[in-house]
Image (spheres, helix red, strand yellow):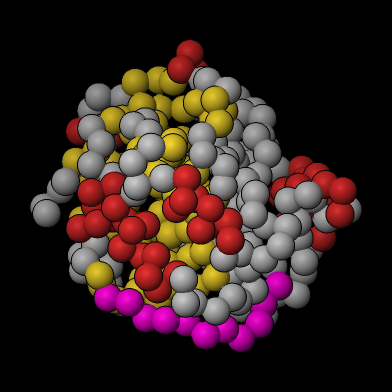
């Protein structure tokens, strides 16, 4: 990714708005699987320019050749996103299989990384727990249109909520899909800051959890997300990847000790 200095606007808000987004009783969890996304950590000194447009010669089919660290984008067998086919889902019902969430109020910074908009939380913003392993909340960002599909259907927007374990060595991402409809309350809270924020430019082994329930977002909100990124990144969804024999599980979410 490319990177340069940026002007960031700090905004304090309660994570209750985020929690309300993921109050779903059922999750579709790629518990043993899935690919690291480009930019899953905020870029700092990277200078590689990538594109979502194949005609540039730097599109998704070339990502594995742009940087040695991105080699898995070309030959990896656990890449995301994937098409979530109902016939491939295995249902898990045990207590140990549930995803637990425990978020806290926190300060955050809203940043345009050029290719997307990121909300980066500061300090301890809480965590999720998957199969007994804790993953701390780091940041969120959006993709237009959705990256994951359900039974071949692509949606209008996808939110990624990124978490890492205590050592920063493993990531767990919660994905929420949206279709056009009523405005999304979380985006409504962020828009005043997003409108004045300055633009900034900025692998395998990620546990993906995609919420089964599809939320709604207004066309105006999606258009704003497109307007505040750099030219060529208005459509910033990666192409669907092969499942390659990975297991897809359905599990429930619990509030834990909230």
Residue toward you, 132 or 10: 10
In the rendered view, tell whether residue 17 sits above or below residue 230: above
Q: Quadrant of the N terminus?
A: bottom right
Residue under the point 11% across and 52% down: 257
62 vs 210, left or right, is: right
Residue 207 in sight: no
26 in magenta: no
Q: Quadrant of the C terminus?
A: bottom left
In the rendered view, tell whether residue 140 sits above or below residue 210: below
1 vs 90, left or right, is: right
Residue 102 in sight: yes
Magenta part, dominant SS: loop
Percent x, y of residue 199: 59, 75
Which region shows up in magenta? 2-12
Give the mark count. 0
Percent x, y of residue 17: 24, 57
Q: Residue furthest front?
A: 220
In the rendered view, tell whether residue 17 sits above or below residue 2: above
241 vs 90, left or right, is: right
Q: Residue furthest top?
A: 87
7 in magenta: yes
The image quarter containing residue 179 is: top left
Residue toward you, 244 or 182: 182
Residue under the point 45% across and 70% down: 194
Residue under the point 71% across and 62% down: 231
Q: Residue furthest left?
A: 257
156 vs 192, left or right, is: right
């Amino acid at each position: 990714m490319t990177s340069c200095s940026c002007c960031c606007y700090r905004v304090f808000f309660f994570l209750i708005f985020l929690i309300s987004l993921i109050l779903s009783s059922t999750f579709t969890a790629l518990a043993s699987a899935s690919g690291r996304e480009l930019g899953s950590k905020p870029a700092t000194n990277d200078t590689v320019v990538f594109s979502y447009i194949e005609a540039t010669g730097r599109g998704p089919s070339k990502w594995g050749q742009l940087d040695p660290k991105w080699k898995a984008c070309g030959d990896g067998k656990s890449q995301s996103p994937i098409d979530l086919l109902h016939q491939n889902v295995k249902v898990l019902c045990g207590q140990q299989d549930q995803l637990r969430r425990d978020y806290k109020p926190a300060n955050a910074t809203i940043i345009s990384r050029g290719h997307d908009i990121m909300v980066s939380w500061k300090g301890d913003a809480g965590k999720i727990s998957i199969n007994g392993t804790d993953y701390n909340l780091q940041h969120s960002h959006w993709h237009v249109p959705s990256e994951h599909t359900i039974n071949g259907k692509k949606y209008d927007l996808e939110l990624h909520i990124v978490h890492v374990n205590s050592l920063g060595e493993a990531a767990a991402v919660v994905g929420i899909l949206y279709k056009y409809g009523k405005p999304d309350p979380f985006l409504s809270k962020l828009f005043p800051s997003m409108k004045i924020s300055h633009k900034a430019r900025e692998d395998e082994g990620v546990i993906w959890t995609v919420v089964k329930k599809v939320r709604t977002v207004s066309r105006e909100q999606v258009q704003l997300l497109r307007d505040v990124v750099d030219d060529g990144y208005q459509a910033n969804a990666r192409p669907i990847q092969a499942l390659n024999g990975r297991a897809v599980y359905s599990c429930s979410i619990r509030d834990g000790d909230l």
